[in-house]
Image (cartoon, rainbow, N blue to C red):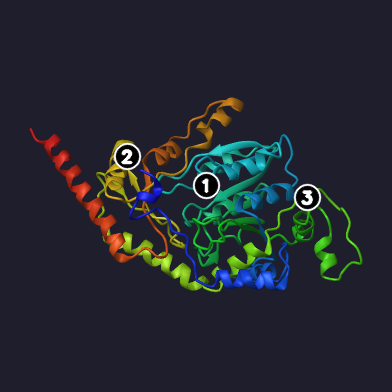
Amino acid sequence: MNWKDYNIPFNKPYQTGREASLIQEVYAQGKLSGNGAFTQRCQNFLENIIGSKKCLLTQSGTTALELMALLLDIKEGDEVILPSYTFVSTANAFALRGAKLVFVDTKKRVPVLDENIVEARIGPKTKAIIAVHYAGVACNMKALGNIARDNNIYLLEDAAQALGSFYYEKPLGSFGGLAAFSFHETKNISAGEGGCLMINDPRLVERAEILWEKGTDRAAFFRGEKTKYQWQDLGSSFLPSEITAAFLWGQLEDYETIQQGRRQAWDYYDNHLPDLLDIYQKPYVPKGTNHNGHGYYLFFKNKYDREDLRGYLGKRGILALAHYEPLHQSPYYLANFPAISLRRTEKFADCLLRLPLYNSISKEEQSRVIDAIGNWSNLQIKKLKSIQLP
């Protein structure tokens, strides 16, 4: 089936209804390139909610990660510790700088870095640990922060899915020296594409702005702090246009409403889906984590049930999706590095199924998804009982 054929899609980008008028305002002002008034509004807003020293809008979450790697002077031979269960951008940003990727397995019940095995992978060339918060659910940032501090290495956050999530009442994106967010159309807050880099280490603020502006001090020039701008460092064009920033501002104006709607949809699934531990587990949310409702998934005991339910839902017009394929099993990795085994990562890749979740999803639509899962589960329970009969 084509994705347009599904009655209940996996995702629908949320629109406030004001984005078009804000983009028209950009046209009227005649300032289309980046780092204008809307960029400043968005950056100030995001700095305030995260408590960051500096926010820089980027063209995507991917470019935010690439700016992060450039800012840390990652070079060939450096090592970074990261999960294999993540989007390829987390790895690409550092591999492009020549870093060796040291993949670490997930926790048993949550597909995030297992902090208990991170320290054993630290070596003399380790430059950073990259914490990826899955579906808005936090890594153990206290433990990872202690490990990074004790070993004098950077703790970074790939918080692409985690805007509006907290770890013990502190916003995700505020723990690492640097943190990347995404505003892709699948995220809670969207600009179609787009992202931002949060700079929490004050030592990195000035240089970050220079790298962000193509390696020049152009931003300082536009603020009237310099009479001219010059090439100061190696950088690139990381800025989004004012058109993207205007669209994003339309979303940020409704920030609380959007986040509340997403969390309510997540809670509806969690409150109405039964616990069927012989077949699947519902998401586990560790103590101290207050997540943003970015994604809801079921974690199956085996990949055959996962695929069977996915097909069952698809035939009923409901699009449910698996997620990441492990990066350590990818063609690129296997062509360049020795094969490794990460058992928990591989289990999540085989057995996790994401359900449709977006702001405009109705209770009726969610009930259809829940009823379909219930009907399928009843069939599975009957099969299990028949197998157990003498």
The residue at 87%/69% (across/down) is 225
139 is higher (above) or lower (below) than 379:
below
Rendering quarter of residue 78: top right
Residue of label 3? 235
Residue of label 1? 115
180 is higher (above) or lower (below) than 343:
below
N-terminal-most mark, 1 or 2: 1
Is the N terminus in the top left, top right, bottom left or bottom right quadrant?
A: top left
Name the amino acid type tagged 3: Gly
**How far separated are the C-alphas under marks 1 and 2?**
30 Å
* Relative depth, front residue between 371 and 37: 37
Could you tell me residue 203's position as x and y percent?
77, 59
N-terminal-most mark, 3 or 1: 1
Q: Secondary structure at mark 3?
A: loop
Rendering quarter of residue 381: top left
Residue of label 2? 307
Name the amino acid type tagged 2: Glu
The residue at 63%/52% (across/down) is 156
Q: Nearer the viewer, mark 1 or mark 2?
A: 2
N-terminal-most mark, 3 or 2: 3
